[in-house]
Image (cartoon, rainbow, N blue to C red):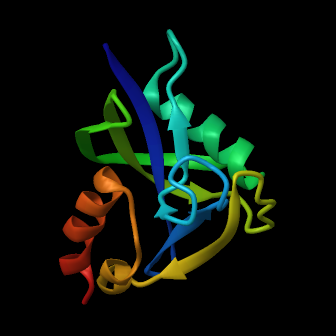
Amino acid sequence: MVQQVAAGLIRHDGKILIAKRKAHDEMGGQWEFPGGTVMPGEPPEQSMQREIAEELGVRACVGRLLAKERFFYGGRDLEVWFFEAFPESFDFTLTEHDEFAWVNPGDLGAYDFPSADRNVAALLCPLEG
């Protein structure tokens, strides 16, 4: 069974927000685009908004779907939906991450991402400039 996940590529001033998972969590210490599991009956866009509110403590407006990636991790079949997201404020409260960073798209390759996020980061790198 495929598990759906929604993630937000949060943009501001030409940069993208990435967040570092807490060291003791699954994929601990890796950077990611914030998001999480789509609940049964929940549209992926709504899931992305809910997850950003839970993980970063802010509301976000959903933009367009940028990519969908499917990969296998820890015996799970995951389909990750990546949406543009625009925060309504920048007063972040981290609950699932140790830190966050605003990164130029061309610099994303310097960060350690899980597989699906790494693929999307690679697609975004050429968008700089």
Residue ID at (35%, 47%): 64
The one of 28 and 70 positioned closer to us in this rendering:
28
Residue ID at (39%, 64%): 113
The one of 59 and 109 positioned closer to us in this rendering:
109
Q: Quadrant of the N terminus?
A: top left
User: Where residue 49 sits in the image (x, y, percent)?
Assistant: 60, 39
User: Where residue 46 sits in the image (x, y, percent)?
Assistant: 55, 30
- Can you say whether 32 is above or below 60 in the image? below
Q: Which residue occupies the extreme top position in the image?
A: 41
- Can you say whether 29 is above or below 128 in the image? above
User: Where residue 70 sits in the image (x, y, percent)?
Assistant: 23, 37
- Name the side, left or right, on which 31 lies relative to 112: right
Q: How many marks?
A: 0
- Name the side, left or right, on which 32 lies relative to 96: left
Residue ID at (39%, 26%): 4
- Can you say whether 111 is above or below 3 in the image? below
Residue ID at (54%, 53%): 34
User: Where residue 47 sits in the image (x, y, percent)?
Assistant: 55, 31
Q: Quadrant of the C terminus?
A: bottom left
Q: Which residue occupies the extreme bottom position in the image?
A: 129
- Name the side, left or right, on which 55 lies relative to 2: right
